Amino acid sequence: MSNPRHPPQPGHGDGHGHGGGHGDGDGDEAELCFNGAVRTVGELIEAGARRLPRRDSLPDPRREARWLLARAAGVSEGWLLLHGDAVLPEDTAARFDEWLERRAAGEPAHHLSGSCSFWGRDFAVSPAVLVPRPETELVVAAALELPLPATARVLDVGTGSGCLGVTLAAERPGWSVRAVDRSLSALEVARHNALRHGVGLALACSDLGSCLDRGYELVVANLPYIPGGRLAALSLEVRHDPALALDGGADGLDLVRALLTDLPRLLASGGSAVLELGEDQADTVAMLAGSLGLAVVRRVRDLSGCERVVVLQRRG
């Protein structure tokens, strides 16, 4: 599978994959810089770039260092570019130093900052949830294009950070959105994000939709879809995400199959489901959906050409 659960990079994304090499200079020299009197923006960025190892999942150490410093200082990257001679407080430099060490070891940048942008909004994230990926915005786009009632009942299955449920509730205030997850820790993150963005989001702890009633006009889901045998080959960054959010079983479709089987019950007549999938899974999902009375009305490709999203509709 190409770029499974590809995490977003700061500015460009957090990246995916393995690689060796170093940043733009000698790591020991950069370490000495932090033990001295270096405190200006420009010097911190240069020293940080030398400390970060260049790899597939960290292709631009200087850009990454600037992104981390901006968040450690609570300013924009643009401000840093305009104030290279500015002297930053000791606690900011110390926080930046700690983040560099953790980032070099493979911890995702968004775990360090505690937030990630999704559909133009800032979402809190933690090691308890999958960091929202850019391709998941395709689920939102497809859902918003559906001709649903102004007061549609919507279900977000496996909500994680709540990025799907919160975004849909914010974009369509008339919709009644419920979000479920089997992880209580994830539900707490989703609750925080719903409050942050001022939306009503009904939350429930559930194994998929098993404890819920029927009659939803829309079901959205970004369930684990990576085959279990491929987890060990994932990048350092992706392996910091919870295994529950990654492992889709032998072929990656265990949970997707379980949800598909329940969709005829969960969906109202004519209701739709928008699901994110992994590479080469759309055909298998389409065949199973057809056998369950669900029509495939659309497939959406991501920028890599993968059929990343399928839109289903319950017949009758």
Image (spheres, rainbow, N blue to C red):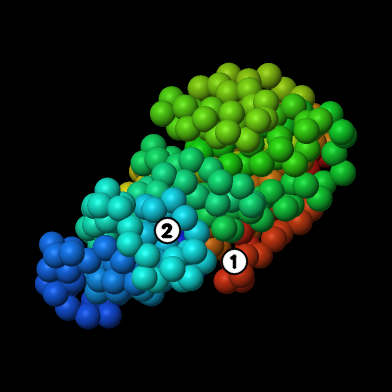
Corner quadrant of residue 302: bottom right
Is residue 133 among what the camera can see? yes
**Residue 64: % across, % down:** 38, 66
Do residues under tags 1 and 2 come within 8 Å of each other at their CB atoms? Answer: no
- Alpha-carbon neighbours of circle 1 within 10 Å: few (<14), some, or many (≥20)? some
**Residue 209: % across, % down:** 59, 27
Q: Badge 2 is on which residue?
A: 70
- 303 to 139, vertically: above or below: below
Marks 1 and 2, how far apart in space? 33 Å
The numbered mark, 1 or 2, whose residue comes first in the sequence reads 2
Q: Nearer the viewer, residue 96 or 54?
A: 96
Q: Residue at x 41, y 29 (%)?
A: 185
Q: Relative to 150, is 223 on the left or the right?
A: left
Query: Which image quarter is the C terminus in?
Result: top right
Q: Relative to 130, is 276 on the left or the right?
A: right
Is residue 245 among what the camera can see? no
Q: Nearer the viewer, residue 26 or 162?
A: 26
Q: Nearer the viewer, residue 113 or 6?
A: 113
- Amino acid residing under circle 1: Cys
Q: Badge 1 is on which residue?
A: 306
- 3 to 112, vertically: above or below: below
Q: Residue at x 52, y 30 (%)?
A: 192
Secondary-structure class at tag 2? helix
Which dot, 1 or 2, sits closer to the camera?
A: 2
Query: Which image quarter is the N terminus in?
Result: bottom left
